[in-house]
Image (cartoon, grey):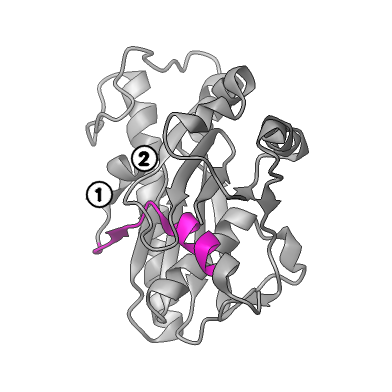
Amino acid sequence: MMKLLIDAGNTRLKWCWYDGEDLPLEFHSTEYEELEERGADLFKGSGPDADDILVCSVAGEETEQMLIDSFADWDLEPRFFTSKAKGCGVTNAYIEPEQLGADRWMALIGAWSMKQEAACIVDCGTAVTIDVLNDQGEHMGGMIVPGMELMQDSLTNQTDGILIDEDMEPNSQPSLLARDTGNAVAAGTLYALVAFIDRVRMDIEKELGLDLPLYLSGGDVDLIEPLLSCESSYEPMLIFQGMITADEDASY
């Protein structure tokens, strides 16, 4: 059975095809405007027809309804994952489990399904989220801070005279100490996130008394990962792995 797996994030739509045996090494990605223009035809060009559609979404009700409407001609209704108190060997730390973003919950399940061990899971996207699993599969909780673009937007929108160079390559590594305002903002926001991730991981390792593997995903990984003081593993398919695991677990 061919499954279309969709990760509807805050700013981008990501998807891949799963044949029941091997998860691909990478996903497709686009802006939501393309979904509005093309509907379900967007997915036909990247894979075969689907027998099932699984969705992990934090994009809001309007976007989720657009996805449902897009697949009306396929005679398939997408199935949406929600966060639960417990599932697939993972226990949710949130007092109200459904408040944990479905993407973070799927990433936790994905990480635990790969290796039943403690882990620090960081998504470097629109928002930067950190979630920690202990070696019993218990979610210890997490943190959320604005990602690089949101930090930079807050500076440019809330202050006078701070401008970002629109010609700067978005994935270029800024100098440590900048000589113009735009690069100073780029470097400052980047190092703020690097320091945040490094410090949280270090403190949690001390609290748990064990080594904490670091799993990274998200659009700003290429900028952040080289500056981290610890070893890390880039896991772009973590949410999709969680979706597969949850779908195939009869107890979920």
Residue 53 location, x and y as percent?
60, 48
> Do labels 1 and 2 touch, CB within 8 Å?
yes
Q: Quick check: 192 above or below 19?
A: above
Residue 168 location, x and y as percent?
31, 18
- Mark with earlier residue (1, 2): 2
> Dot 1: what SS?
helix
Q: Magenta span covers which residues?
A: 230-245
Q: Quick check: 44 above or below 216?
A: above
Q: Amino acid at mark 2?
A: Leu
> Which is nearer the eye, 155 or 117?
117
> Which is nearer the eye, 140 or 66?
66
Q: Is residue 86 magenta?
A: no
Residue 181 visible in the current orientation: yes
- How many labels, in total? 2
Using the image, tell me which numbered label, if any, was put on residue 190.
Answer: 2
State the residue at coordinates (46%, 52%). 123
Left or right for 11, reference 95: left
> Which is nearer the eye, 176 or 95?
95
Residue 184 location, x and y as percent?
34, 27
> Dot 2: what SS?
helix
Q: Amino acid at mark 1?
A: Leu
Q: Quadrant of residue 33?
A: top right
State the residue at coordinates (68%, 47%). 78
Query: CA–CA distance between discs 1 and 2?
Result: 9 Å
Residue 125 visible in the current orientation: no
Residue 174 location, x and y as percent?
26, 31
The residue wearing badge 1 is: 227
Q: Quick check: 103 above or below 31?
A: below
State the residue at coordinates (48%, 55%). 240
Q: Residues within 10 Å of mark 2 (few under 14, many from 20)?
A: many
